[in-house]
Image: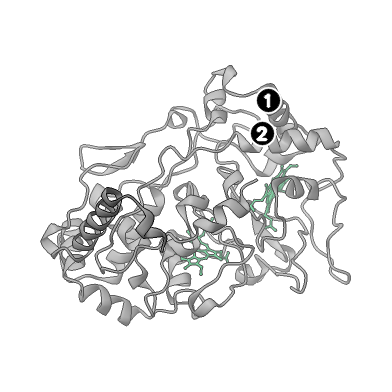
């Protein structure tokens, strides 16, 4: 046994730490308190609501401003939740009690260590079932207007009904979800702190989780310093990459428009599926519009270096492979017999190897996890908070 070779003092410390954690997770309901502080990047307004503070909010909106400028305003942002609601949402997000069999939390597929994605091509839900698509990262999701790769959900609240109740994701049912939360005295106590009225309702659950998701703000990368006027924040290769990104040859910024690096539109690119999968009809599903066949929401590229593999079903392992897709010829990966309405900005930019490398350099400058929330050490259900995909971190980082 390796443990026996550890110095005695270290062993004692370990035992003590485990004892503390155990009391922590079994603590009585009155020992749970929600934070009354807004998360980093937010400040309390007079109405006791957390509002996003960002230099971008002092710039004028994107409306009619074209796509060229770096100092353009943010899209409308989902803020105005209370600090307590956000903190409650954090606990719920990591608590496997939310799944039918207590095996899976939101964080199983949206791991903070992996840019709130899961490092997999396609996510794995309850009972080890593989779902159809890749888990997107959740940074800045509060700045988005529609959700899912196919744009099929209109709000964060509507989106989460998918994973909570899908048989292959968390497999739960509304009645069971309510009953299990109401059955935990600590949750009853915490929902009262966050909403001031009982009993726990489904709406309160959805509001708290949405509040937490909307607090995941990443707008302080080195790129952002550069955009705000600090030229030295980017290296020469990164600036070259930014220039390629914004050029009319590469056209990346036409769709991946700063500051979110998404214009939030649906675009048909003709991206390939992994071997063995048939074409994903994408946005044609929810919209019923054949011109949107295989169309997907333009994803934000913030923290993109953290969320490999890439595209809706994780077909590309690296950023280099992903950016190369754009230069291999318009429609080169469209399956035979399919005629897709490819977006007019998807064409033949003929980027050189060096330009592709610079694009990747630039994309790495969009990484900012300075407001990463804390993973709770314990959750009110007494179950182990989910954050268990560390082994994938090594595998998937470039
Ligand atoms: C089994 C893995 C899994 C679990 C568990 C899971 N998700 Fe997801 N999540 C995904 C996948 C896969 C997608 C993409 C779905 C699609 O586009 O069809 C997604 C998409 C999303 C999106 C849309 C993001 C965007 O940019 O459009 C949000 C928001 C989200 N999930 C939040 C949550 C929350 C909140 C929970 C817990 C209630 C949760 N997810 C649980 C796998 C998961
Ligand atoms: C016509 C709009 C459009 C243009 C132009 C465009 N993209 Fe995209 N981009 C998308 C869409 C839509 C997706 C998602 C496609 C999918 O999942 O199949 C995407 C996905 C990506 C991804 C993967 C994101 C993820 O979360 O997996 C990267 C990286 C990316 N684009 C970079 C670029 C770069 C670099 C350029 C310029 C060479 C570019 N894009 C040009 C629309 C566009």
Question: Who is closer to the viewer here, 248 or 383?
Answer: 383
Nearer the observer, 172 or 398: 398
Residue at the (21%, 66%) spot, across then down: 187
Q: Quadrant of residue 17?
A: bottom left
Q: Residue 379 location, x and y as percent?
A: 28, 62
Mark 2 element type: helix
Q: Position of residue 288 (x, y in %)?
A: 65, 71
Residue 11 visible in rendering: yes
Quarter of the image for residue 19 reads bottom left
Which residue matches tag 1? Answer: 239
Is 231 positioned to the left or the right of 251 in the image? left
Q: Is residue 317 above or below residue 380?
A: above
Residue 40, numbered label: none
Where's residue 40, x and y in %?
34, 38
Sequence-wise, the earlier of marks 2 and 1 is: 1
Q: Which residue is mark 2?
A: 362
The image shows a total of numbered marks equal to 2
Look at the numbered disc 1 and give the secondary structure of its residue. Answer: helix
Horizontally, residue 142 falls left or right of residue 283, namely left
The residue shown at (69%, 22%) is 236
* Residue 181 vertical placement versus 144 (above, below): below
* Residue pictured at 49% horizontal, 81% vertical: 167
**What residue is shown at x 74% (from left), y 66% (from top)?**
274
Q: Position of residue 256 (x, y in %)?
A: 64, 43
Question: Is the residue under label 1 in contact with that under label 2 (CB below 8 Å)?
Answer: yes
Q: Quadrant of the N terminus?
A: bottom left
User: Relative to 15, is 393 on the left or the right?
Assistant: right
Marks 2 and 1, how far apart at CA: 7 Å
Quadrant of the snapshot with the C terminus: top right
């Amino acid at each position: 046994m390796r443990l026996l070779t550890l110095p005695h003092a270290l062993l004692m410390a370990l035992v003590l730490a485990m004892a503390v954690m155990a009391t922590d997770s079994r603590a009585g309901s009155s020992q749970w308190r929600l934070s009354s502080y807004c998360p980093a990047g937010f400040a309390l307004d007079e109405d006791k609501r957390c509002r996003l503070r960002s230099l971008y909010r002092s710039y004028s909106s994107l409306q009619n401003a074209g796509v060229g400028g770096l100092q353009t305003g943010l899209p409308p942002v989902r803020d105005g939740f209370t600090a307590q609601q956000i903190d409650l949402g954090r606990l719920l997000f990591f608590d496997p009690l939310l799944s039918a069999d207590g095996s899976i939390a939101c964080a199983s597929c949206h791991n903070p260590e992996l840019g709130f994605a899961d490092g997999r091509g396609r996510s794995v839900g309850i009972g080890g079932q593989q779902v159809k698509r890749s888990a997107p990262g959740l940074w800045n999701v509060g700045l988005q207007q529609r959700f899912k790769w196919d744009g099929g959900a209109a709000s964060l609240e509507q989106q989460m009904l998918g994973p909570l109740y899908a048989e292959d994701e968390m497999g739960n049912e509304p009645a069971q979800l309510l009953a299990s939360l109401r059955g935990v005295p600590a949750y009853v106590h915490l929902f009262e702190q966050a909403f001031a009225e009982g009993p726990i309702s489904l709406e309160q659950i959805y509001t708290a989780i949405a509040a937490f998701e909307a607090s995941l703000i990443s707008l302080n990368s080195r790129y952002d310093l550069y955009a705000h006027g600090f030229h030295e924040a980017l290296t020469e290769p990164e600036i070259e990459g930014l220039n390629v990104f914004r050029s009319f040859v590469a056209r990346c910024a036409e769709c991946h428009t700063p500051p979110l690096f998404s214009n939030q539109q649906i675009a048909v690119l003709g991206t390939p599926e992994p071997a063995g999968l048939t074409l994903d009809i994408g946005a044609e599903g929810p919209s019923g519009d054949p011109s949107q066949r295989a169309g997907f929401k333009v994803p934000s590229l913030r923290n993109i270096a953290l969320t490999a593999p890439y595209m809706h079903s994780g077909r590309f392992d690296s950023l280099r492979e992903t950016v190369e897709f754009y230069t291999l010829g318009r429609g080169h990966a469209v399956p035979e017999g399919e005629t897709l309405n490819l977006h007019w900005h998807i064409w033949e930019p003929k980027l050189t190897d060096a330009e592709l490398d610079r694009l990747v350099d630039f994309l790495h400058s969009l990484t900012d996890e300075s407001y990463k929330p804390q993973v709770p050490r314990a959750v009110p259900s007494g179950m182990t908070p989910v954050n268990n995909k560390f082994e994938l971190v090594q595998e998937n980082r470039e």
